Amino acid sequence: MKKLLFTAFIFIILFFTFPNTGTSQGKGMDQEYQVIPDEAIRLRILANSDDDKDQELKRKVRDEVNKEVSSWVEYMTDIEEARQLIQNRLPEVEEIVANVIEEEGFENEFTVEYGKNVEFPTKLYDSYLYPAGKYEAILITIGEGKGDNWWCVLFPPLCFLDFSFGTSVSAADAEEAEELELEEEQEEEEKEVKFFLFEWLGWS
């Protein structure tokens, strides 16, 4: 009788565990691509170098540009309207960057571009993976643009999330990290099931 109960219990555990595992995995994948909508406008700023002064200049440019552009699109819901506004007011962004560079005593040249083919590296931010690719964005390049970058999503407004604090990873590393995380979750679930069975059977 006890063996029959044990078999039935195992069947119930497997029935509920495996579907949930699949659902969890699917949900995680959805979340990775829902944080930033398909139709979004990003802001990316490339520093001249990784020198502390160059990085500080990048942050000051970030603060001023982000504050201004975010106020333009804060209450917008139509991406076409946001695109048109940003395109028309790009000279204002250039003016902001020029003023910050001058006020900070730098003489760096810079470029301000807006388009749909701005290159972004793969980024791992918290538990979300942002794939490398070409995205619509305002790209500000200060000097040689060889320093660490900062980026956020201007539309819809997501610049309260500082994606630059994520970890840059290669596509292969990202896939490996995702597989390892899934294996660890499965191992943890197996341990919990075994522990529960041992407790239930009084084998502990």
Image (cartoon, rainbow, N blue to C red):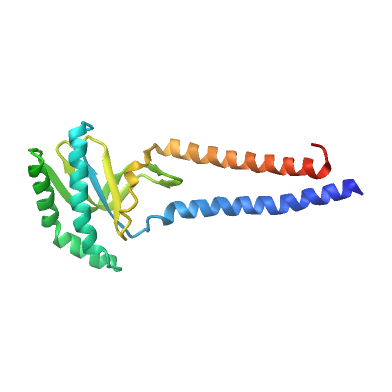
* Residue at image point 9% right, 52% down: 95
Is residue 114 visible in the rendered image? The answer is no
Q: Residue furthest top?
A: 51
**Relative vertical location of residue 81 with respect to residue 129 in this rendering, above or below:** below
Residue 30 point in image, percent of width and height: 48, 55
- Left or right of 87? Residue 8 is right
* Residue at image point 41% right, 55% down: 35
**Relative vertical location of residue 76 with respect to residue 96 in this rendering, above or below:** below
Q: State which quarter of the image contains the C terminus.
A: top right
Residue 115 point in image, percent of width and height: 22, 54
**Relative vertical location of residue 84 with respect to residue 135 in this rendering, above or below:** below
Is residue 42 visible in the rendered image? The answer is yes
* Residue at image point 24% right, 63% down: 73
Q: Residue furthest right?
A: 1
Camera-side residue: 175 or 110? Answer: 110
Residue 49 point in image, percent of width and height: 20, 33
- Left or right of 168? Residue 117 is left
Residue 100 point in image, percent of width and height: 12, 46
Q: Across the whole image, how many numbered discs are drawn on residues? A: 0
Camera-side residue: 192 or 178? Answer: 192
- Left or right of 93? Residue 10 is right
* Residue at image point 34% right, 51% down: 161
Q: Toward which corner of the image does residue 185 lie, by quadrant?
A: top right
